[in-house]
Amino acid sequence: MTSITAVQTLAPRVALAQPPTALTSAADTLTAAANVPSSTVSLGQPTIASEPQTYTRQGLLPGQMRYVWENDSQDKLATSLLTAFKTSSTAGRFNGIGAALIEQLVRNGGSGISQSVFAVSDDSPINPAVLKLQQTRLRENPDNGVSFSLTTASGATIRLSLASGEKGLAVSAEVDGGELSDDELRGLGKLADSFQSTIDGLNAQPPQLKLGALAKLDTTLFSSLQMNAKLQTPTGEQRFSLDLNERTRKLSLEGPTGEVRLSLDTHDGELLGSADQRKAAIANYLTQFDAAQHRGRADENLMGLFKDAFSQLNSLDDTRPTAVQKPFSMTDKDRALLSGLADFSASISETAQRSNPMRQDETDSFTFSASQQTDIQRQGLQDYSVQQRQQSKLDASFHQGANPLMALSLGSDRESQNYSYHVIDDQASSTTRLGFDKGKLVEASATQQASQKERILTYVNGDLKSDVTTPKAVTQSRNLQSLLKDAFEQERIAQRDRGDSVLEGLLQGQRSQWWLQTDPAKIAA
């Protein structure tokens, strides 16, 4: 490990200074050098001359490092920066830094922060102008960078930046458009650990999504949040984007194995059902995602990120703000056939691979998308209809070996060409509709549809032996008016006699009749 003997600081002049942690001073090093003999002689042994140890004028041995700071500070943030810089690779230098930056900003009462540290291995004098240029370049074009922007309900904007390169680490924090109140500072402090866990998760191998409190933003304090990251990992570059505001929630992940995208339309809080209803809807969607992953042989880690993104962004609705009073407001009865979730579009796409050198037109690929769209038509306070459509699409292709006990290894020789090539094309949808006339339920219907098509090409020693396409398709329409009327009547009696709601329990076991189902066999059942 490279030893450290001196620290230089630019604040604003260059000078030797004590670092934020205990380091050996240049004077101590020079004293130690004076006590080291240039040669030694042992009686009875051949004379061995030790090479004299030469020190630079900074008191460094050849190859030793010194650290140059932007500002002379001994706060906890500087300590965290030095620790991360000394103990981590370029990709892992944000370890603990995100949380430390937020915590320091809170301790400063919102006052701006700018700090950087660079490693220098030679004894050349530091030019302040050159150092300033290095700091600017690092912040504008880092090997690894994270930016974070948080707008308060009062209108102030908090901006954080983390940047690392081979020889430097820089952070900054500023508040524009106003000062932070005590409540806002406390709210910001509560995000520190989640900000750090998000960074750490993206840096993990394989990457993980750990949004924590970032996915449960306190809307009484903050109106929007943006976070972007570019990280160099051992497997390749990972890019991340998160955008939360009053109307939308968007997340994207792009990495070597593929990409994940999710967008929620949250401007209409009327669609949001009870916590139990949303929990059941999320579970149903995750089941469909798992089925697609299994059928299309998708990468499990990438699908895990997709599922985590869907679950965590929908968890934002666990605490719903009190709805603004409107002439018309939906009730739990109006949402009986809905998912209870905000409308969304979501997709996962795996990076295509060409694993067969003899047939480059055959790819291993996986693309899956799902969406939900709700339409409310009102003719009056008691005359209206609600329609929700859920849909999904899967396109996938993969190679499978003829012998399940042996790993498939496709080569340029015909003897390796014993396999089947699968091409998947699936679609599914579910449409529910509720209609009310003068407040009375006059329509309740659901239509589920699912189709699966799989083409299998089988090769033996490179020769095509079979090409078979198997299609499956089912459409099921149901009139749910009697079911709902009975459930609504039991709910009315329970509310009257006990003041309790039983509607969710009555509908829970029936929802497979109208929610999205990608397997035709399960619709037919």
Image: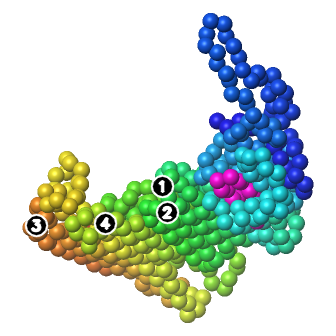
Which of the two discs, 1 and 2, sits closer to the camera? 1
Q: Which x, y percent locates residue 235?
A: 48, 55
Which of the pair 192/329 is nearer the observer? Answer: 192
Q: Are marks 1 and 3 in contact (CB under 8 Å)?
A: no
What amino acid is labelled 1 in the image?
Answer: Thr
Q: Are marks 3 and 4 in contact (CB under 8 Å)?
A: no
Indicate the secondary structure of the residue bearing disc 4. Answer: loop
Mark 1 or mark 3: whose residue is earlier in sequence: 1
Q: Earlier in the sequence, mark 3 or mark 4?
A: 4
Is 302 located above or below residue 406 in the figure?
below
> Badge 4, how many Cα within 10 Å: few under 14, some, many 20+?
some
Image quadrant holding the N terminus, namely top right
- Asked if residue 19 lies left or right of residue 202, the reply is right
Label 2: element kind: strand
Task: Kindly identify the amino acid type of the residue bearing the numbered disc 2.
Answer: Gly
* Image coordinates for residue 492, horizontal then vertical, percent: 53, 69
Tell me which label, 3 or 2, sits earlier in the chain. 2
Quarter of the figure that contains the C terminus: bottom left
Q: Amino acid at mark 3?
A: Asp
Q: Which residue is mark 2?
A: 255
Q: With 397 as the anchor, is 464 left or right in this view?
A: left
In magenta stretch: residue 393? no
Q: Is residue 264 above or below residue 286?
A: below
Residue holding disc 1? 235
Q: Please tell me which residue lies in front, 460 or 128.
A: 128
Q: Which residues are magenta?
A: 159-172
Disc on res. 354: 4
Main SS, magenta residues: strand
